[in-house]
Amino acid sequence: MSKKHSERFERLVDEARAQIRECTASDVKQRLDRGETFQLVDVREESEYARSHLPGAQHLGKGVIERDIEQAIPDTSAPIVLYCGGGYRSALAAESIQKMGYSNVLSMDGGFRGWREAGFPVQEP
């Protein structure tokens, strides 16, 4: 079940979505299956990432991504796919790092929840 968000938050995310590109969990799975090279970044809280995450994903939480992205991914043209729990935080993070000059950023709509609902594998401790 989808979490109900406030109207203001949803408006903020909608504004971000108008400025970014999104993809689906199936798109990401296909890219992984083809062996494509891209940065897969989990922007959820550290505790969420620790419980389980997409295979091969690195963690750069929404709260620190702007501070840490340049060290983690110095190439501003590198292909990056961001995801969170449902696609809201990753949309905001995608807009933010685009403003920093990252030009090849996607946000995974549906997020981790959509990935799990599709039955795709997750990495657990």
Image (spheres, rainbow, N blue to C red):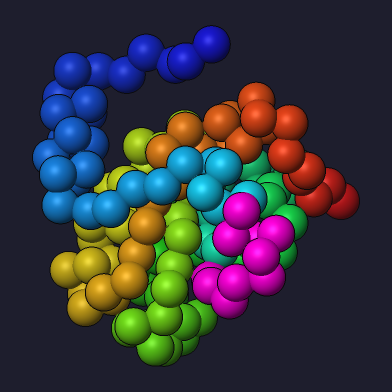
In-image side of 21 versus 107 (left or right): left
> Which residues make up the magenta segment?
30-39
Residue 24 within the magenta-colored segment of the rendering: no
Label total for image: 0
In-image side of 67 versus 36 (left or right): left
Residue 61 can be seen, yes or no: no
Q: Which of 6 and 73 is in front in this view?
A: 73
Q: Which of 125 and 28 is in front in this view?
A: 28
The answer to whether residue 3 is above or below residue 94 is above
The answer to whether residue 99 is above or below residue 106 is below
Residue 31 within the magenta-colored segment of the rendering: yes
The residue shown at (68%, 70%) is 35
Could you tell me residue 21's position as x and y percent?
Answer: 28, 53
Q: Nearer the viewer, residue 107 or 10?
A: 107
Residue 30 can be seen, yes or no: yes
Could you tell me residue 52's position as x and y percent?
Answer: 74, 44
The residue shown at (64%, 42%) is 48
In-image side of 60 versus 47 (left or right): left
Dividing the picture into quadrants, the one containing residue 109 is top left
Dividing the picture into quadrants, the one containing residue 4 is top left
Could you tell me residue 55's position as x and y percent?
Answer: 73, 56
Could you tell me residue 57's position as x and y percent?
Answer: 64, 61
